[in-house]
Every structure is written in C-alpha cells, then in structure tokens.
C-alpha cells in the first residue's frame, strides 16, 4: 500500500503541522515531494529537513490565495520534478471571531485560502492528470465541514464547501483515472489549533468531546493519506474520511 516510489506529490502548507507530517509520510513511502508555503525561508528549512533524512524534496514560496497563479505553480512542479501524480490541498487558515464581528475582508481571506485556492489547484492539477489518465487529489478538510460550532463560521463554511467540491470533482473525473478524496481532520496538535487548545474554557470543552480522550498527533493523519493515494484505494473516490478519534461518531 505504501510504495509510492518515484511519484511526485505537491503538498500545500507543507512547512509545519499536518502538512509537514504528510510530506514526510509521502517521502517515507518513496514519493518525491514538492512543498509550498508563503515564506521562502520556512519552505527552505522544511526541504532541508526532509533532504537530511535522505528524501527527495523541493519547494518554493507560493500563496494559495493567488488562485489565478495556480496553473503556473503546477507547471513549475512539472518542469522541476518531471510530473505530478498527487496533489495534497492542505494549506488552511482559521479565523475565530463572533460572527457579528466577522468582517467581509476576513471572511473573504479564509475562503480565498481554504476554498478558492484549493479549487484552483485541484483544477490545474486535474487538467494534467485527466490528460494523463491518472492522478490523485486529497484535500485536508475538517470535522467542522459538517458540524456547526460557534465563532468559526468562515472556516466551517469553507470546509463544508471543500467536502462538496471533493464530491463534485470525484464524480466528474471518476471515469478518467483521477481520484479525488478528502480527510475530515479532527483536533490535532499543531500551531493552528494552539489558541483553542490553550484556551482554559474551550480547550477542556473540546477535549471532552473527543471520544479518544486526547488530541491527535500530526503523524496520525499520515496512514489515512497514504491509503487514499495508494492502489489499495483504487475504487475509493469522493470520500470524506474522518480522522478524528471518534469525534464525528458522537
Ligand atoms: N490542526 C487541527 O486540529 C486541524 C483540524 C482540522 C483541519 N485541519 C486542517 O489541516 C490543514 C493544516 O492545518 P495545520 O493545523 O497543520 O495548520 P498550521 O500548523 O497552521 O500550518 C498551516 C500550513 O499552511 C501554510 N499556509 C497558510 N496559509 C497559506 C497560504 N495562503 N498559502 C500557502 N500556504 C499557506 C503555512 O505556512 P505559511 O504560514 O508559512 O504560509 C503552514 O505550512 C488546514 O487545512 C486545517 O484547516 C487542522
């Protein structure tokens, strides 16, 4: 299941947190990885770390909110790495704020990064994958794609829309050899979740809701991704797979 020898993966937001764990996991399974994040320095650091482990890694600065440059990024990856087999749409941002105080600028920013950025990259990667008759796209969504929660309206709306985007692309491309899936991540220990985890009220309340009784470690999202991109999942497309310690089962 885990042999991805020589396959090229593009991972957005691959410099830390879940994205870095996913990039390492793909590289460990034999894939050649191309990471992007907004800062050239942090991308270079992550690439250096992966190379030090003996993995083939490259990357560059790219803001996924620049959706009209998505084709350029996919062309760059194909030029530098020779091909593109796997796209992991992982980059995401969250804005925690009472909805009455949520400005349109902030709403648009979250939607631009999480939803439109992922759409544009999936479209760009999908074009070349469909032409080749082979490819896999996995988007990192959230349990908040289907559950409501206070003060995260833009984030939850973007993730719900990503789940639907996943299903639509999966259906549209199902006969072409391109599989499109998502992972609905629960609560993991990363920088993004730190304010919620450290909040003396919200932190324990969230933990109480997780049947596993603990937050996930980034490494725990790797196996589900490797399954979704491997031949073991050859008949799996349009799936939004919960990886959440049981959160969505309650
Ligand atoms: N952690 C959780 O509990 C959790 C739960 C459910 C879903 N998720 C989802 O999992 C994904 C990763 O989350 P995480 O917790 O690993 O977050 P994180 O630790 O904040 O890492 C986010 C990554 O995305 C990059 N990034 C942010 N904005 C970007 C942009 N506009 N363009 C390109 N790269 C950008 C960041 O690099 P730069 O800042 O340098 O650009 C960083 O590499 C997100 O989609 C998130 O919604 C996380």
Image: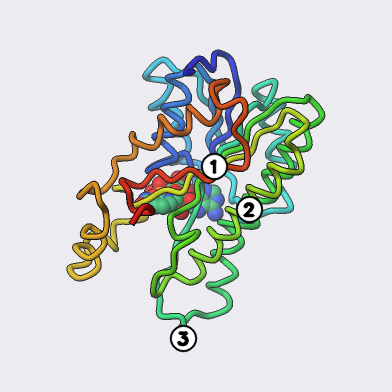
Looking at the image, which is closer to me, 156 or 39? 156
- Check residue 100 in the rendering and tell me which mark sits there, or answer none: 3
Tell me: residue 171, above or below residue 80.
below
Judge: label 1 CB < 8 Å from ligand 1: yes
Left or right of 129, for residue 164 = left
Callout 1–callout 2 Cβ contact below 8 Å: yes
Judge: label 2 CB < 8 Å from ligand 1: yes
User: Which badge, 2 or 3, comes first in the chain's sequence?
Assistant: 3
Residue 39 picture location, percent across and down? 49, 46
Residue 169 picture location, percent across and down? 70, 45
Residue 10 picture location, percent across and down? 58, 33
What residue is shown with label 2? 117
Inter-mark Cα distance, 1 to 3? 31 Å
Residue 22 picture location, percent across and down? 44, 34
Nearest to the eye among marks 2 and 3: give it. Answer: 3
What residue is shown with label 1? 12
């Amino acid at each position: 299941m885990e042999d991805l020898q020589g396959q090229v993966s593009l991972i957005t937001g691959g410099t830390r947190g879940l994205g870095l764990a996913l990039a390492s996991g793909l590289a460990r399974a034999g894939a050649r990885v191309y990471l992007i994040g907004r800062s050239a320095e942090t991308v270079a650091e992550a690439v250096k770390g992966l190379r030090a482990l003996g993995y083939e890694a490259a990357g560059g600065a790219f803001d996924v909110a620049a959706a009209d440059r998505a084709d350029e990024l996919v062309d760059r990856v194909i030029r530098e790495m020779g091909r593109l087999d796997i796209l992991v749409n992982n980059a995401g941002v969250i804005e925690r704020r009472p909805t009455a105080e949520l400005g349109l600028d902030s709403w648009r920013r979250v939607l631009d990064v999480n939803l439109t950025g992922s759409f544009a990259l999936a479209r760009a990667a999908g074009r070349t994958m469909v032409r080749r008759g082979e490819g896999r796209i996995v988007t990192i969504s959230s349990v908040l794609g289907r559950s409501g929660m206070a003060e995260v309206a833009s984030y939850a709306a973007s993730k719900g829309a990503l789940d639907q985007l996943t299903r639509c692309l999966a259906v549209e491309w199902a006969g072409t050899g391109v599989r499109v899936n998502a992972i609905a991540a629960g609560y993991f220990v990363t920088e993004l979740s730190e304010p919620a985890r450290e909040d003396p009220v919200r932190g324990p309340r969230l933990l109480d809701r997780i049947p596993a009784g603990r937050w996930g470690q980034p490494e725990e999202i790797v196996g589900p991704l490797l399954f979704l991109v491997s031949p073991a999942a050859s008949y799996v497309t349009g799936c939004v797979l919960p990886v959440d310690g049981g959160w969505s089962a309650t």
